[in-house]
Image: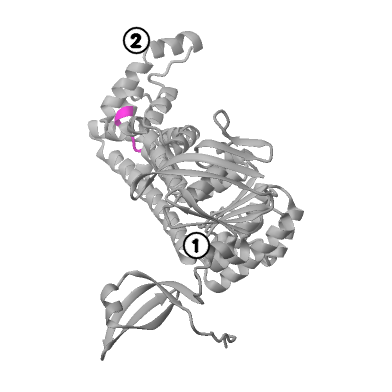
Amino acid sequence: MITIDIDKKLLGSMGEMPLHVGISIENKSFVALSGQSGSGKTTLLRILAGLERAKGKIVVDDEIWLDEKTFLPPQKRGIGFVFQDYALFPNMSVLENLLFVKKDLTLAKHLLEMTELESLQERKPMTLSGGQKQRVSLCRAMMNRPKLLLMDEPLSALDPLMRNKLQHEILMLHKEFGTTTVMVSHDPSEIYRLSNRVIVLAQGKVVSDGDAKSVLLKTQGSQKFSFEGELLDIIKVDVIFIAIIAIGQQLVEVVLDASEAEVLHVGQSVRVSTKAFSPVISAKK
Amino acid sequence: MFEIFSNIEFTPFLLSFKLAFVTTLILFCVSLPLAWALSQSRSRFKPIFEAITALPIVLPPSVLGFYILYALSFNSPVGAFLDEYFGVKLVFNFAGLVVASCFYSLPFMVQPLQSGFEGLSKSMLEASYISGKGKIKTMLKVALPNIKPSLMTAVIVTFAHTVGEFGVVLMVGGSIPNETKVASVAIYEMVEIMDYTSAHIYSAIMVGISFLVLMSVYIFNGKHNKYIGGVS
């Protein structure tokens, strides 16, 4: 069990912002931290890692990591951390990167085998693709069999196919090692697939805490579909208007009437929802 | 035509290189922790230390030479202390030259190392801390091997700069043959006694060596950058 109750003043784009988080995390759970940029997610993760100081208390099982008198440095916390920019050691080969953490060749080989990196073990990080680098980083983080694994947007720099593969591997490692995991992520499908609890931060406070379904599903009442997107353009066609909206990577057209077109403006964030139809789902060719 | 070379005394060159080698070695050991500490420091007092380290770049060598000469002589507490307790005299001998050169060339070792360390990815160093490694191990195993171009620049420029120093050396060491008469001082004396032939030969050798040294630094750094740029 990890009990966190911390306070820290952050300097955000809107001036000073207090970060105040009080949560407890069950052992072996997989927590996703979400929220807009500047909400304090990364800072919270770094405080957990001991990379930044804060007031308050962090207790992991019976060990005090932080209170008024104690500050356990990152070296002594026995954690794993996966950085967004991989943070591999360029002067060492893949295998050496792992062994730098702990001279445990059996574990290193096992991890490389699980993530299909065996054939690359002698390569230097510079010669690997982004996905391969992040897998090495993940393996390296597991090398000291951490009590707590922290990941800061680990997959955000990767393409969707590679994300999928890595999500699968993260889940596999999570199951095998039973590591309590906290991951910062923006991607709802990733959060849904991996986590069993989502904590949403806004302006330094927890605004939502629950399982992925209850936190992330945006539909309300009788709504069948509800999407958030950006209004790119409003085109007048005869007596009606057509709105072009970007939802994720896709563009869609929605018909508007004159009164709707009047109150909306281009560049606005909008929600597109629909009630009375039954969608057809078919496999992508 | 080779008989003019037979009259040339090469001891000043050997002395210059010996001085540069010893200075570079000492400065490397001193500057490594200093540059690392400066690069990682977020202290308010950091600019003070940075300014002190950089002083020898802007000070006239005569000013630096004067203070070092004064500090090391018997008239100053430092010089008197060294003489009284250790029997060490550091004026007008080779050891004194080494001390003076270390002050003179300090920024040329510290600054490239510091900027190399500052250019490293912060998360890479943090990854090392999280792996349980302390600051010293992180510096030696992670930081230092990843700043090779800066390391190369620091070592070679310090070496070359020490070979090329004149004012400080003359003030602290004088011109004692086989002891403190380095190449630059020898050239100065040749010009003074109007032995232009020897001055030409000495000067040409200095130009040649300096050019080769600098070119090798640029070739090495160019190759290194290309390597990094080509595959990342």
Residue at 66%, 54% in the rendered image = A29
Asked whether, in this view, residue A109 is left or right of residue A261, the answer is right
The stretch drawn in magenta includes residue A182: no
Residue density around tag 1, few if under 14, some if 14–19, many if 20 or more, within 10 Å = some
**Along the viewing direction, whichever of B185 and A180 lies nearer the viewer:** A180
Q: Residue at x 28, y 79 (%)?
A: A259
Q: Which residue is mark 2?
A: B75
- Which quarter shows the N terminus of chain A? top right
Residue B56 coordinates in the image, percent (x, y): 32, 32
In the image, which residues are magenta? Answer: B164-168
Residue type, numbered disc 1: His
Name the residue rendered at 49%, 34% in the picture.
B33
Q: Is residue B167 magenta?
A: yes
User: Depth-wise, is mark 2 or mark 1 nearer the camera?
Assistant: 1
Question: Disc 2 is attached to a residue of which chain?
Answer: B
Q: Is residue B179 above or below residue A59?
A: above
Magenta stretch, main secondary structure class: loop
* In-front residue for pair A5/B130: A5
Q: Residues within 10 Å of mark 2 (few under 14, many from 20)?
A: few
- Kindly identify which chain the residue marked by label 1 belongs to: A
- The residue tagged with tag 2: helix, strand or loop? loop
| One can see residue B75 in this view | yes
In the picture, the quarter occupied by the C terminus of chain A is: bottom right
